[in-house]
Amino acid sequence: MTTETYQEKILAGMHGLPDEVLAEIADYVYFLRRKVTMPDVYAAEVHREMLQYTLRSGRQDSLTHLEEEFADYDQQFPRNQLDR
């Protein structure tokens, strides 16, 4: 298929779609344009997002582990009434 054929097919497919869907299509087109025209910037953004996701996941895993570790701490180590 030629570029013109693809463009015609895309435009025909968008005809009659609600504004919300057209907005999503526009976002996707600009996402693809950025990915193609600035691959280094795109790769850096993806790397940063993946790193942030990994850090958030690791932090949540650590918090979950600590909560499980100390779930019954007060029962195992009751405070002495004289220490208060």
Image (cartoon, rainbow, N blue to C red):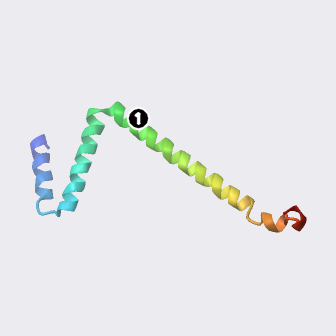
Residue 42 found in image quarter: top left
Horizontal and vertical percent for residue 38?
30, 32
Horizontal and vertical percent for residue 67?
69, 60
Q: Compared with residue 57, is residue 39 higher up or lower down, i.e. above or below? A: above
Residue 76 found in image quarter: bottom right
Count of numbered circles in the view = 1
Query: As drawn, is 34 to the left or to the right of 65?
Result: left
Query: As drawn, is 67 to the left or to the right of 73?
Result: left
User: Mark 1 is on which residue type?
Assistant: Ala
Q: Residue at x 15, y 52 (%)?
A: 10
* Quadrant where the N terminus is found in the figure: top left
Q: How crowded is mark 1: few (under 14 residues within 10 Å), some or many (20 or more)?
A: few
* Disc 1: which residue: 44
Query: In the current view of this chain or complex, which residue is farthest to the top?
Result: 40
Q: SS of the residue at dot 1?
A: helix
Foreground residue, 70 or 16? 70
Q: Which residue is drawn at 11% across and 59% down?
A: 15
Query: As drawn, is 33 to the left or to the right of 83?
Result: left
Query: As drawn, is 10 to the left or to the right of 53?
Result: left
Q: Which residue is drawn at 24% across and 55% down?
A: 24
Horizontal and vertical percent for residue 50?
47, 43
Q: Compared with residue 38, is residue 57 higher up or lower down, i.e. above or below? A: below
Horizontal and vertical percent for residue 37?
26, 33
* Quadrant where the C terminus is found in the figure: bottom right
